[in-house]
Amino acid sequence: MSKKHTEVKVPHSVLMSVESPGRYVGGEKNQIVKPITEGMVRTVFCFPDIYEIGMSNLALQILYKVLNGPEWSSCERAFSPWPDMDAKLRENNIPLYSLETKSPLNEFDVAAFSLGYEMCFTNVLQMLDLGGIPLLSKDRSEEDPIVVAGGPVTCNIEPMADFFDAVFIGEGEEVDLEFTAVIKKYKDEGKKDRKALLKELAKIEGVYVPSLYTPKFEGRRFAGFDMEEGAPASVKKRIIKDLDSVDYPTRPVVPNNNVIHDRAYLELFRGCIRGCRFCQAGFLYRPVREKSAKTLCEQGIAIMKNTGYDDLGMLSLSTSDYTGLPELTDGLLEDFKPKHQSLSLPSLRIDNFALELMEKASQTRKSGLTFAPEAGTQRLRDVINKGINEEDIMSALKLAFAGGWSTVKLYFMLGLPTETMEDVEGIADLAIKIEKLYFDTMRELGGKSRKPEITVSTSMFIPKPFTPFQWEEQNTREEFLEKQSHLRALLKKHRNIRYIWHDVETSCFEGILARGDRRLCPVILDGYKEGNIFAAWDQFYKDENWQAILARYDLKWEDFTKGWSTEDALPWDVIDVGVTKAFLKRERAKAYAETITENCRSKCAGCGAACYKAGICYE
Amino acid sequence: MNNEERLKQMTRQQHQHEYVCRGVFERKGALSYIGHLDLKAVFERALRRAELPLLYTQGFNPRPMLVFALPLGVGLDTEGDYFDVSMEVPVEPEEYIRRINEELPDGLRVLSAVSIDEPKNSLMSVVTCASYRIEAPGITDAVLKVFGQESVETMKKSKGREIKVDIRPLLIKPLTSSAPDAAEYMCYAGSQQNLRPDVLLKALCETQGYDEKAALDARITRLALYGGTYPDLTSIEGLL
Ligand code: SF4
Ligand code: SF4
């Protein structure tokens, strides 16, 4: 374990020659700089994307506070340097450092990565490499930090299994300190046996140590794991049962640099009552657990006071499903109005209440309305269990148009299971009907001449682990492109409808990472070595390069996108998120039967998450 | 008038009385690496945290009325820049300094303040001169040579085009407090005519053969801002 402490000094000339140098200097209000003491367990929270994105991440602020709690534990921050700074650090032999004490990453006891999306994988390697930490878990010595990861992506960490010593499954507030406490004991006892330490860490519930599992393959097929003695057969997701009882960061670090969203955040609840069958978050975060409106109101007011922001964003998977919403928004707005502060309410389901609330909550101009029907026909919406129908959308929009709104954004997915061209055409039909509804409503009200702005946005459906569609075949590039161009042709003539689409190549790449296995580890390693970082940014994604690397290892996209039978072993079978495989199979069958499953609040579907004895399953 | 001032003028309610706190601040360390708009946002948030009786702009997106005398570029330290904050009711300078300093991040500090009842002149318009210190090896020789010349031509970007400008008339005098590796000088500054220190450094490299690497590493500090007409300079506090 590391002992020394060096302070990295970045020359002024380096900072002056990169874009937004404020990203690399720290010094923000509410940052916590603890003096380094012997025996302290030092964690560096690593966010594998740029500062501006990382600083809007709630997990960072929560765990920063938790890990800086006990006297013996400290937590600092590090972010991916943008390519200009990456080059400068290499050119000048400057290691990647933490913002608080400017320590090189390899001097920490723990390097903890937050993984929000698969496309950041090569940036993890960038940070390790620049931080002076060996990339492969097996190459690390006693002196090196324990490299861990958390976040939704860890439910299938196999494509990155060779790089992480351990990963957290589920929510981190409790497990993080249990983890560092084991490391503290190990340090105090002066032990020097990394392998034994990892085995010890694997005993903590919710901790998966990939090196204790060796995958087997039959031909090109994954065929389960050989496990080391003592490795748990199943690693169970951790959750916080009572969200009111855990500390919330009401004194978050306030960036000096222009972040993506210049506001504070308040988390209303975790999980989602709706079981949209394509949605990984909906299953991963079960069961739904709400915070009380009273707690939230107090926290919201405190955050605004401690940060000085003028806008508070409500954070959850589906704001409208929060049962205390009227009480909470009334409470907050009463306090905010005289102080010129506003509320941001994303993912509101549009109805009368929502429109009034939006009117009250923000002093800014009428912003756009967002709908996510996800599929163009009722049949396909039933397949994916999206409990939204055309009449609901139309009646909500009629209200909104009459109330002065004229900007609508519609989100859809292409490539959903059972989709036909008819379903794709349904997307265009719906958008055209909405355009007509706008003009009809305006005419009824006695003709305003303003044009509506209707945006149709499509993304590619990517089957994800722990959803009823985890066994599905993903559409090929050709299929995606054909659907895209068909839709584009259908909407071309409609001047008030704008069609925007996601990039097919990057989405397909995300698809192989999402359901990949350990055969992808060397692919990602080569990809990094050949200069692929910031793959989520279309301008940096190099498709031909990735194709060539896959071929080098005799791998094909189809190895990871062709799908499985429901009896096959899956690379993420060791992980237990509470939702059972039996339930997912039932849901899959219901999808093919075009049958809806009710949401958790109206009727329990017996998904398995009740094993946590918490939240909505026990209300 | 700069944009901030224009916005302030446009959105102020008629007959609304404004009590201005004019503060002098210093900036150093991490906070020197942010741009002017970010700096303004940092001050805004600190003012809100300090729970001062701020006057807000009207309209869709109310903001505290906050005006800086002269933008501070990325990388620049300052020992004496000015900013005005409008209040609904008078605030004692000592009280103002104490409350805002408690909330500013390390590296920013208000050194002194005066309160002004209904200022007549816009803060930006009163600035005419500034003094700077450039710290870099052997810099003072190069700066003194430039002062000895009749004209110093350099290329400057203006509206997307490169144009040739003579910066010599913008330089006023070297200061006697200079040391060999720390050149101090006075030049014109403000909305009428302004010499940015990075433009001077560039000219030093081009015309005096000063080392470009050393120039990139040079630490620049704005020492003070002045009003009035050189040589009859006055302090900005006094210019109400
Ligand atoms: S409403 Fe559906 S898509 Fe949205 S978070 Fe919930 S389950 Fe996922
Ligand atoms: S056990 Fe029932 S109530 Fe609980 S999350 Fe699953 S379906 Fe919802």
Image (tube, coloured by chain):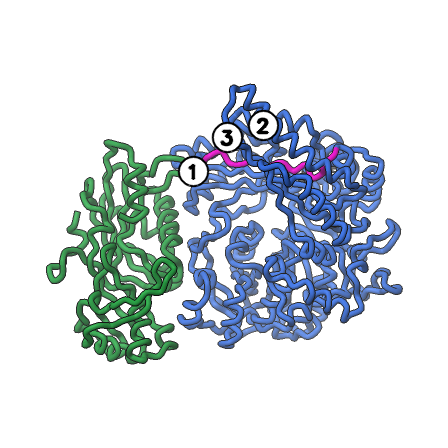
Chain colours: A blue, B green
The residue carrying mark 3 has its beta carbon less than 8 Å from ligand 1: no
Q: Which mark is residue A450?
A: 3
Q: Amino acid at mark 2?
A: Tyr
A108 in relation to A301, above or below: below
Q: Residue B27: percent from the left, percent from the top? A: 32, 60
Which residue bears the numbered disc 1?
Answer: A341
Which residue bears the numbered disc 2?
Answer: A438
Q: Are marks 1 and 2 on the same chain?
A: yes
A153 in relation to A108, above or below: above
Asked whether, in this view, residue A138 is left or right of residue B68, the answer is right
Q: Amino acid at mark 3?
A: Arg
Label 3: chain letter: A
Q: Secondary structure at mark 1?
A: loop
Q: Comparing marks 1 and 2, which lies closer to the viewer?
A: 2
Magenta-highlighted residues: A365-377
Residue at image coords 53%, 74%:
A90
Label 1: chain letter: A
Q: Are marks 3 and 1 in contact (CB under 8 Å)?
A: no
Q: Residue B108: percent from the left, percent from the top? A: 33, 57
Earlier-in-chain disc, 3 versus 1: 1
Circle 3 Cα neighbour tier, 10 Å, few/some/many (<14 / 14–19 / ≥20): few
